[in-house]
Image (cartoon, rainbow, N blue to C red):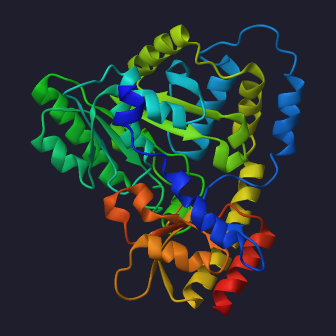
Amino acid sequence: MGLLTGALPDFPWDSLAPVAARARAHPGGLVDLSVGTPVDPTPQVVRAALAAAADAPGYPTTHGTPALREAVVAWFARRRGVPGLDPAAVLPTLGSKELVAFLPSLLGLGAGDAVLHPATGYPTYDVGARLAGATPVPADDPARLLAQRDDVRLVWLNSPGNPDGTVLGVDRLRGVVAAARAAGARTGRPVVVASDECYAELAWDEPWATEGVPSVLDPRVTGGDPTGLLAVYSLSKQSNLAGYRAAFVAGDPALVAGLLETRKHAGMIVPAPVQAAMTVALGDDAHVAEQRERYRRRRAALRAGLEDAGYVVDGSQAGLYLWVRPDGPVQDAWTTVHDLAGLGLLVAPGAFYGAAAAGHVRVALTASDEHVAEAAARLSGA
C-alpha cells in the first residue's frame, strides 16, 4: 500500500482528460500534440527483419546478440563520435523508460542517497529515485551541487532535453563528468552520470544540426575513460519503434556488467525478434534521414503557426517538441493549454516537467502531415 499510494505523484497525463474533451468538441475535431508517440510507419526494412526472426522458440540472451551489440558499437562510432566502444559494455533494454525508472534501484540506491536530474525534465527521473527510496533533486547546475553535497550517487543528464530541446555541449558535459568524479574521490562513493540521449538524431539548430549532438561517451568528454558513465538511447523516435520497446544502455563495462547480472535474475530480456529488428535499424541511416525530414517539415509548419498566433518558441534546438509560451507577461501553462484547446489543439502543460517549467507548454511534432497542417492553419487563423 505505502509505496505505490504515497511515495509517487499522480500520473500527470490523466489530468489532461477534461481538456482533451474540450479540444475534441472543436468543429474540426481534435489535433493531439500532447504526447510524443510516433505516428509514421515502421520502416519496411525493420519490419522485414522482425518477421524473418519470428521463429524464436528459445529464450533470448539478456545481454543481446553479438550482432546487436556490434551494431550499437558501429552506430556510436558512425553517428555519435564515440569510437572503440566495448561490445561487452552494451545492453539492450525494454524501451528506455524502464531503465530510467529502475536505474537507481538497479544501482542499489536507497535512503540517504540523492539523485540529481534536470529541473525542467522528464518526470520519470523523479519517479525512479522515489521507487528506490532515494531523494530526487532538481538541478540546473549539477556540477555546482556535486561540489556542495556528499550524498549524490546518480546524476541524470538529458540532451537533447525533453521537453525543452536543450542541447548540452562538450564543455558542459565534461564539466559534469569531472565534478562527479571529483565528488566520488572526495566521498569514497562513486557517482554515476547517466545521460538520456534518445533525441540525439533530431538536431535542428546549429552547430548541432551539422556537428551532431555530443554524447556523454564522447572521448572529448570522458578523456578516453568511460568509468562511471552510461548513455541511454531508444529507437522509438528515430525509427518509429515505440511499439517494439527497443532501446539500449552503454558505457562503463563494470556498470553494464552489474546491470546485466541483475537483469538476468529479473528476466528483463528484449525479445529475440526485436533484437534482430534493432540490429537492422541501427545499420540503416536512410530511414532515419527520411524520418528526420518529416519532423523538420512539421516543426517548421507548427512553429510558423504558433508565432503567427502570438506565441514564442524557446530553446527547442533539437528533439520532437516545441517549448512554447505566450508572448508577453508570464501565463500559467494550464491557461495556455485551455486556450489552445479552444482551437481543438491538445498540448502538454509545462507543469508536468517540474516547477521551473510552469510558464511553458510542450507541443509535439508527432502528428501526421495532415493534422500538422490543420493545426498550423487554426493557429494562423487565430
Give the residue at x 86% y 22%: 54
The residue that appears at 59% across and 46% down in the rendered structure is 79
Question: Which one is in front, 173 or 308?
Answer: 308
Q: Can you say whether 29 is above or below 252 in the image?
A: below
Q: Is residue 60 left or right of residue 73?
A: right
Q: Residue 224: image x %, image y %?
A: 37, 33
Give the side of residue 245 with respect to residue 353, left or right: right
Q: How many marks?
A: 0
Say which residue appears at 38% left-offset and 72% top-offset.
359
The residue depicted at 32 percent of the width and 60 percent of the height is 355
> Can residue 147 be seen by looking at this rendering?
yes
Q: Quadrant of residue 352?
A: bottom left
Task: From this view, report whether residue 48 is shown above or below residue 106.
Answer: below
Left or right of 268? Residue 358 is left
Q: Position of residue 234 (x, y in %)?
A: 60, 40
Front residue (pair 252, 316): 316
Quadrant location of the C terminus in the rendered image: bottom right
Counting from the top left corner in percent of width and height, residue 119 is at 32, 54
Please state the horizontal and vertical placement of residue 82, each as a whole percent of the image: 50, 39
Which quadrant holds the N terminus? top left
Say if residue 84 shows up in the picture: no
